[in-house]
Image: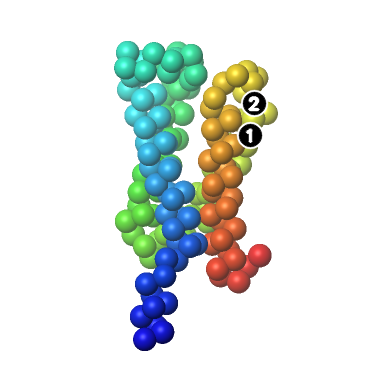
Amino acid sequence: MIAVVRSAEPDIPILLIVASLVVNVLVAGFFGLATGFSLSSILPRLDVVFGPDTPSRRILSCLYLAIAAMSAVALVVAPLRMSIVVVLLPFQILYKLLTLFFVADSRSPVPWWNLVISALHAASLWVAFSSQGLR
């Protein structure tokens, strides 16, 4: 009976990791598509925030789409989830934190949202490693 009750309890580390991956799919997927297909007619502030449609912005779009794709794989293929998470989330935290230093316009929303997402990913990594006995 105890085993049945325990299995019904939510696994907080997994829920937080899944939340990070879902945020990646939604946010990186959305901005990857928006910047890659230049949807500035639908999103008029897109060019203000990400700059004009250039090869550099298309490369950024590819980065976003790769993050969204790997996050989707991690969500769907549970045996690969932790292997992907321990590489993908630290990479994202680093690149997102670097935007705070390299984006000169402090009014740009991108670095500040990157900071929020980095905090979520850091919490996900913390509970993931803590659940494995690593701190």
Q: Position of residue 97 (x, y in %)?
A: 62, 37
Count of numbered badges drawn on the protein: 2
Query: Which numbered disc covers residue 102?
Result: 2
What SS does tag 1 mark?
A: helix
Q: Is residue 13 visible?
A: yes
Residue at the image position 50 percent from the left and 49 percent from the top = 88
- Image-quadrant location for residue 115: top right
Residue 23 locus on image (x, y percent): 43, 43
- Circles 1 and 2 in contact, beta carbons < 8 Å: yes
Question: In the picture, residue 2 is in which quadrant?
Answer: bottom left
| Horizontal arrangement in the rendering, residue 67 relative to residue 99 (left or right) | left
User: What colour scheme governs how the chains and residues are painted in the rendered image of this protein?
Assistant: rainbow
Circle 2 crowding by C-alpha within 10 Å: few under 14, some 14–19, many from 20: few
Position of residue 128 measured from the top left corner of the image (x, y, whole percent): 54, 62
Quarter of the figure with residue 42 = top left
Give residue 45's position: percent from left, percent from top: 43, 15
Residue drawn at (45%, 35%) of the image = 63
Q: Is residue 125 above or below residue 38?
A: below
Image quarter where the N terminus lies is: bottom left
Marks 1/2: CA–CA distance: 6 Å
Q: Give the quarter of the figure containing the C terminus.
A: bottom right
Residue 90 is marked as none
**The disc labelled 2 sits on which kind of residue?**
Phe
Which residue is found at the position 58% from the left and 30% from the top? 112
Report whether 21 appears left or right of 111.
left
Of residues 1 and 112, the one nearer the viewer is 1
Q: Secondary structure at mark 2?
A: helix
Amino acid type at mark 1: Leu
Residue that mark 1 sits on? 98
For the point 36% across and 25% down, the residue is 34
